[in-house]
């Protein structure tokens, strides 16, 4: 599908931020291995979290869906069944990596498969530590999906310092740890999103500047009864859009503001954005709020690499903001972007260049020479079949003086099925 993007003059209105992808995946997986029944409200209808639900059903978990309400009858740690068909994780890295930890830990004979993009993403980062724990997982060429999981002879304990700041890796090890009689500890020096620890009530203590988080088979897996907060990573597109458009005022309701996710908010504020956090409250274990954003003049920023794990999914749209920020902005220490649904560093450099921005691509980042009055050239933008590339290109294109096109625009359904209608609803 080609999506046409018309120039936008005014952007106003209210958007209810769509349900969080990371929390949706986790709520379903954790409910599935709990001993109790869970009722999850506002479960994401996006393709990735739906892949998680269908994999869990194949593992024998009873799930009833009623709109965005999902009732899950926990099968318990020992209740998962050997699936008859490969578990299709689609485009979802979180499904493959977290579920890999669960089926690997439970020793369920199965195969995890994914689409072309997921099959090209490294899985060695989870295969190696999980096998060290005693799991039996084999990847294609030792690294890629399909992953073949076999029963194991028991898991050992482990103290594992994370070699990369990745919540998916951290979660995979901790989830497998739930099947080990010995303590499994993960040492995290750079803190990544902490939904797994929060939603499972895992024990964590400070360790130097980081944390040590532990799990084991004696940990009680809680039921998951709450409303999934809105996805800050989806809201980030509107935070940037509302900032760079001159006549803009947007209210983003019910947005998750977990501190491990919102570095982009702080970064935009440091660049000069006007964002107000209103009506903060807790939704289960997670904080939510309404975010109000208004037009603002931005200045460039030299991003502190320490922020990267807490804005990894927002970096593409932050690069769009940097094109409109006066001066030279720099992102470094973001090599992980090359391992996402596509190589997001190269893809964004191409998208920004197509629009006429002045950028230099580096091995682990990008330099962007921005101007407040930057007028992007209208173009035919590739999406690389990557939802966040399509949405970032769209926000950029709304600032052009002529109509642009986004190729394979249906990929936004991976995380945000209503993105195009929301863009239409707030733009004139
Ligand atoms: C996610 C973690 C991040 C993020 C992804 C979702 C999660 O990946 O990019 O979209 O839900 O744990 P990494 O753990 O690979 O950084």
Image: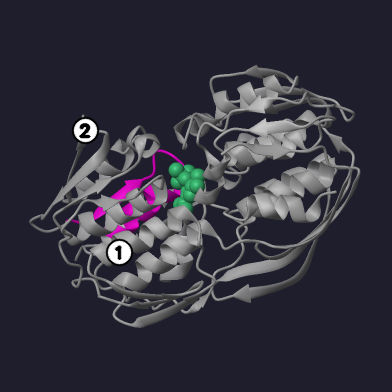
> Position of 176 compared to 204: left or right?
left
Q: Is residue 354 above or below residue 279?
A: above
Q: Is residue 316 above or below residue 236?
A: above
List x then y, in percent, for residue 172: 33, 53
- Disc 2 is placed on an element classified as loop
From the image, state whether disc 1 or disc 2 is nearer to you: 1
- State the separation of the CA atoms marked 1 and 2: 25 Å
Single out the residue that lies furthest toward the left: 153
Mark count:
2
Q: Which image quarter: residue 405?
A: top right
Q: Is residue 348 above or below residue 6?
A: above
User: Residue 420 versus residue 384: which sits nearer the camera?
Assistant: 420
* Magenta stretch bounds: 156-176
Q: Is residue 159 magenta?
A: yes
Task: Name the residue beneath numbered marker 2.
Answer: 142
Tell me which numbered mark, 1 or 2, is placed earlier along the sequence.
1
Q: Residue at x 36, y 68 (%)?
A: 30
Task: Name the residue beneath numbered marker 1.
Answer: 56
Q: Which image quarter: residue 35?
A: bottom left
């Amino acid at each position: 599908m080609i999506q046409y993007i018309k120039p936008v003059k005014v952007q106003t209105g209210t958007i209810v931020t769509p349900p969080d992808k990371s929390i949706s995946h986790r709520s379903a997986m954790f409910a599935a291995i709990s001993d109790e029944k869970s009722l999850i409200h506002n479960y994401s209808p996006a393709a990735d979290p739906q892949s998680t639900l269908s994999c869990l059903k194949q593992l024998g978990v009873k799930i009833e869906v009623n709109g965005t309400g999902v009732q899950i009858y926990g099968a318990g740690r020992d209740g998962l069944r050997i699936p008859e068909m490969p578990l299709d994780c689609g485009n979802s890295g979180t499904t493959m990596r977290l579920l890999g930890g669960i089926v690997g830990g439970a020793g369920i004979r199965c195969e995890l498969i994914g689409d072309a993009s997921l099959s090209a993403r490294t899985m060695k980062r989870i295969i190696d530590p999980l096998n060290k724990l005693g799991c039996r997982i084999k990847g294609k060429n030792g690294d890629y999906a399909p992953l073949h999981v076999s029963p194991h002879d028991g898991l050992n304990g482990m103290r594992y310092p994370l070699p990369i700041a990745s919540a998916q890796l951290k979660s995979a090890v901790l989830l497998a740890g739930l099947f080990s009689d010995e303590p499994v500890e993960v040492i995290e020096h750079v803190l990544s999103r902490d939904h797994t620890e929060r939603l499972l009530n895992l024990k964590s203590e400070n360790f130097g500047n980081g944390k040590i988080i532990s799990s084991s088979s004696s940990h009680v897996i809680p039921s998951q009864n709450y409303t999934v907060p809105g996805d800050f990573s989806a809201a980030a597109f509107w935070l940037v859009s509302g900032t760079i458009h001159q006549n803009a005022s947007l209210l983003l309701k019910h947005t998750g503001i977990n501190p491990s996710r919102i570095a982009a908010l702080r970064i935009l504020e440091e660049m000069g954005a006007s964002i107000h956090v209103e009506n903060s409250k807790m939704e289960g274990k997670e904080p939510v709020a309404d975010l109000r954003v208004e037009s603002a003049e931005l200045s460039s920023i030299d991003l502190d690499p320490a922020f990267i794990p807490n804005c990894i999914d927002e970096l593409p749209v932050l690069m769009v903001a940097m094109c409109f920020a006066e001066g030279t902005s720099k992102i470094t220490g973001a090599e992980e972007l090359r391992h996402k649904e596509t190589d997001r560093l190269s893809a964004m450099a191409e998208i920004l260049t197509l629009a006429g921005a002045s950028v230099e691509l580096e091995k682990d980042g990008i330099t962007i020479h921005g101007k407040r009055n930057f007028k992007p050239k209208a173009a035919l933008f590739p999406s690389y079949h990557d939802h966040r590339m399509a949405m970032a290109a769209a926000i950029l294109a709304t600032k052009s003086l002529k109509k642009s096109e986004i190729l394979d625009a249906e990929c936004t359904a991976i995380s945000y099925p209503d993105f195009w209608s929301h863009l239409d609803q707030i733009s004139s």
